[in-house]
Image (cartoon, grey):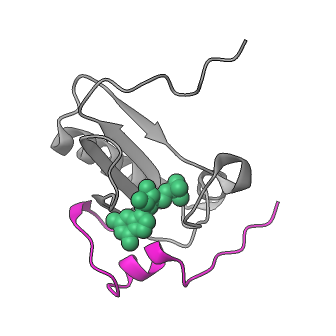
Amino acid sequence: MTFDYDDQNIFARILRGEIPNKTVYENDHALAFADIAPQAPVHVLIIPKGPYVSLDHFAGHARPEEQAGFFQAVAEVCRIAGVDDGFRAIANTRAHGVQDVPHFHLHILGGKRLGRMLPEVG
Ligand code: 5GP
């Protein structure tokens, strides 16, 4: 599997400050901001600052400090958002995962009881 990063994607432009965002949290390795089209009362996107297209790209290739910084941001977002009653983390990936933006992002959704993750089969 090779990973080709397109630096014109919308989240790359947000990281470069070309497009505004509602920042929730930021550290040296990650940025968290409100989703522009929230699908739950809490809907935050957490992205690494490095050029990774997907969760498997990030998990396999990001340096340990990048991974630590990213997961520190996850913890801080959950604390700031106050999702003590629970939340869902989603990383849509490539075509089968219906990923729209080709820069790895983790959706944090919460603030209410969410429906089942996928339609029940059978
Ligand atoms: P995906 O389908 O790739 O997992 O999710 C992409 C997400 O990015 C969507 O939930 C969409 O609403 C969000 N999004 C797309 N463009 C922008 C933008 O310019 N700003 C923000 N804050 N979110 C965006």
Residue at (37, 27) in percent of width and height: 114
Could you say where residue 49 lies in the image, as x and y percent from the top left? 43, 70
Q: Which residue lies furthest to the top in this view?
A: 122
Residue 29, given in percent of the width and then of the height, sits at 39, 65
Nearer-the-camera pick, 116 or 83: 116
Quadrant where the N terminus is found in the figure: bottom right
Name the residue at 17% across, 35% down: 82
Q: Is residue 72 left or right of residue 76?
A: right
Q: Which stretch appears magenta?
A: 1-28
103 in the magenta segment: no
User: Is residue 15 at least partly visible in the picture?
Assistant: yes
Whether 5 is drawn above or below 29: the answer is below
The quadrant where ligand 1 appears is bottom left
Q: Residue at x 24, y 46 (%)?
A: 76
Q: Is residue 68 left or right of residue 104?
A: left
Q: Main secondary structure of the magenta part?
A: loop
Left or right of 72 in this view: 116: right
**For residue 40, what is the image quadrant?**
top left
Residue 10 or residue 71, whichever sits in front? 10
Q: Does the magenta stretch include residue 22?
A: yes
